[in-house]
Image (cartoon, helix red, strand yellow):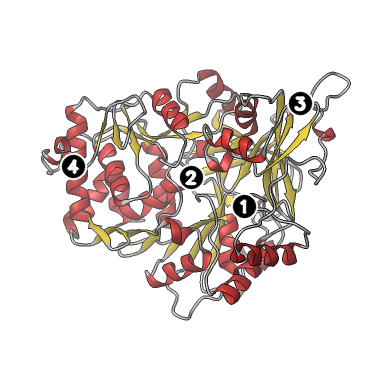
């Protein structure tokens, strides 16, 4: 571990790199790049502007930008001002972005805050460009001060903000730099959307160590083969890829001389073991946003094939598996994953009762009750077994199905709804069950459109089942076991693809591999029986037929 990293603040470490190596590239995006000297100077201007506006410790500043050099400048500038930042992902619907801004009580939004009801300023505006770019004095944050607020799905229909401190973030940075040998001159990718806490992990360790953050375009992120080529071309040393994307990347051939040494993954149960001939290690990771991204980590081998293996507690973290009576369980016995240590966040912003429920003291230790189930192997590693409650995890995002149900119930004609996860071949997808009267006309496009207006894309079910009424048990409570499997008879159907010759041929490829009679534009690949192996075959056949690749819809 670099002793300097242990002695100064995180932004002080970045300033130190700028002083020693001002010309070293800090962030690269397309043909653009910014050096550490430029990053530090621009971030100082942002910090001075915010301090002049009254920003201090615990002040919250929104950042309404996507993955970009500007976003990095803004985030560093906010921490330099002693404040905490709140990502406001521009891909979210306006209603959700407005809710985040209002709930967090941000002082100002950096970037495009139009329509959010709060003052906004661009990094290229005169107010910021006119500020002094020299280092600020006397703005060293304390470990307990706020670093950022990240919003996760809420069971009541309202997302909740997790307050992560500078001490929590320092813990993540120090562990990552040490565990994966990150050093000056190394590079890592920034793939995750800014509203996903994985983006925190992809950013700060590399900046603090003097590395380079490389940002691929959205079109590259959506095409696995193009992403592989990007990683090779840019000499990336360490990267993070969500589970599905990692499974696809692991199936590709990688050229000799590939610089990538570690592929980090997480978000869903990884069931594909890495091939022995891959030039890099594959490390599976687990951790809720409430514990600063990562709580357990472990390199994968062929022995973990088919197992939801999430490794061991990382340095500085503790993991206990407890039964309903809050007693530790033995090896091989399922228990709730409870996490303690330096990564446990402060709690939920403005929600003391919810904080008290999930962040508890046990045997004199403060810990977070994850609501996830796990079991411990003989070697002390942990297997992930699923959720205790109705919260689910899709594509790395933790989702409270109650929030989706609340939005569905507001759509005219919907009398009630239930959202569940259906799993097929190890892959999971959201299915919405909708109760509606016979005389109410519902369409797949109408339901998805209604949800897209208020929810992020990753929370919108790909399939809807129409019911006359929701099933209940003898006590009048919802009977989830009585929910029927989706079928052609009960699904609010999509229209069969009937477009261009290219669409028809692509539909033919998919129908042949999935062994289905019909397929439509909005059909869910996994609910039709798809998995990562079939996805790789789709990519290969599309390439052979059309000479191009396949783009994956949605963000990371």
The label nearer to you, 1 versus 2, is: 1
Left/right of residue 368 with respect to residue 94 in the rendered view? right
Counting from the top left corner in percent of width and height, residue 549 is at 53, 68
Question: For mark 1, what is the residue?
Answer: 310
Which numbered disc flags the more N-terminal residue, 3 or 2?
Answer: 2
- Please report the residue visible at 20 percent of the width from the left and 26 percent of the height from the top: 53
Specify whether residue 9 is in view.
Answer: no
Which numbered disc flags the more N-terminal residue, 1 or 3?
Answer: 1
Instruction: Give above or below for 100 relative to 246.
Output: above
The quarter holding residue 56 reads top left
Q: Are marks 2 and 4 in contact (CB under 8 Å)?
A: no
Which numbered disc flags the more N-terminal residue, 3 or 4?
Answer: 4
Between the C-alphas of marks 3 and 4, the distance is 61 Å
The label nearer to you, 2 versus 4, is: 4
Question: For mark 2, what is the residue?
Answer: 316
- Please report the residue visible at 17 percent of the width from the left and 40 percent of the height from the top: 45
Between the C-alphas of marks 1 and 2, the distance is 17 Å
Left/right of residue 192 with respect to residue 442 in the rendered view? left
Disc 3 is placed on an element classified as: loop
The label nearer to you, 3 versus 2, is: 3
Question: For mark 3, what is the residue?
Answer: 439
The residue nearer to you, when weighing 362 against 429, is 429
Q: Are marks 1 and 4 in contact (CB under 8 Å)?
A: no
Question: For mark 4, what is the residue?
Answer: 44
């Amino acid at each position: 571990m670099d002793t300097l990293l242990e002695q100064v603040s995180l932004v002080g470490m970045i300033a130190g790199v700028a002083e020693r190596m001002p010309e070293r590239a800090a962030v690269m995006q397309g043909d653009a790049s910014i050096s550490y000297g430029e990053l530090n100077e621009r971030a100082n201007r942002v910090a001075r502007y915010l301090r002049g506006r009254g920003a201090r410790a615990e002040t919250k500043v929104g950042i309404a930008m996507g993955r970009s050099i500007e976003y990095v400048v803004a985030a560093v500038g906010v921490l330099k001002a002693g404040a905490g930042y709140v990502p406001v992902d521009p891909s979210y619907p306006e209603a959700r972005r407005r809710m985040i801004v209002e709930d967090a009580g941000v002082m100002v939004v950096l970037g495009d805050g139009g329509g959010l009801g709060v003052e906004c300023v661009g990094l290229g505006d005169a107010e910021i460009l006119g500020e002094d770019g020299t280092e600020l004095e006397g703005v060293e944050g304390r470990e307990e001060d706020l670093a950022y607020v990240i919003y996760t799905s809420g069971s009541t229909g309202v997302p909740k903000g997790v307050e992560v401190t500078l001490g929590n973030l320092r813990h993540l940075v120090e562990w990552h730099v040490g565990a994966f040998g990150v050093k000056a001159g190394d590079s890592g990718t920034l793939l995750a959307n800014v509203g996903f806490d994985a983006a925190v992990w992809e950013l700060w360790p590399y900046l603090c160590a003097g590395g380079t953050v490389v940002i691929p375009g959205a079109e590259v992120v959506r095409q696995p083969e193009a992403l592989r080529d990007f990683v090779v071309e840019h000499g990336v040393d360490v990267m993070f890829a969500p589970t599905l994307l990692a499974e696809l990347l692991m199936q590709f051939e990688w050229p000799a001389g590939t610089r990538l040494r570690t592929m980090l993954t997480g978000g869903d149960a990884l069931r594909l073991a890495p091939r022995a001939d891959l030039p890099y290690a594959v490390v599976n990771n687990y951790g809720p946003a409430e514990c600063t991204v990562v709580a357990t980590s472990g390199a994968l081998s062929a022995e973990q094939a088919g197992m939801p293996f999430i490794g061991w507690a990382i340095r500085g973290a503790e993991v206990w598996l407890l039964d309903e009576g809050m007693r530790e369980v033995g090896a091989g016995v399922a228990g709730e994953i409870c996490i303690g240590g330096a990564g446990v966040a402060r709690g939920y912003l403005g929600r003391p009762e919810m904080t008290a429920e999930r962040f508890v003291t046990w045997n004199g230790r403060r810990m977070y009750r994850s609501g996830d189930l796990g079991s411990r192997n003989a070697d002390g590693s942990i297997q992930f077994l699923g959720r205790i409650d109705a919260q689910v995890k899709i594509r790395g995002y933790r989702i409270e199905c109650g929030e989706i149900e609340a939005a569905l119930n507001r759509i005219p004609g919907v009398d009630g709804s239930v959202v569940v996860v259906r799993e097929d071949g190890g892959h999971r997808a959201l299915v919405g069950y909708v109760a509606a009267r016979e005389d109410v006309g519902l369409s797949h496009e109408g339901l998805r459109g209604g949800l897209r207006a208020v929810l992020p894309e990753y929370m919108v079910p790909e399939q809807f089942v129409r019911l006359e009424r929701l099933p209940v048990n003898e006590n009048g409570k919802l009977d989830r076991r009585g929910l029927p499997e989706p079928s052609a008879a009960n699904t609010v159907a999509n229209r069969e693809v009937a477009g261009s010759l290219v669409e028809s041929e692509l539909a033919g490829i998919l129908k042949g591999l999935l062994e289905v009679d019909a397929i439509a534009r909005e059909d869910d690949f996994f609910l039709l029986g798809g998995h990562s192996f079939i996805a790789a075959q789709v990519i290969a056949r599309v390439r052979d037929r059309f000479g191009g690749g396949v783009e994956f819809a949605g963000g990371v």
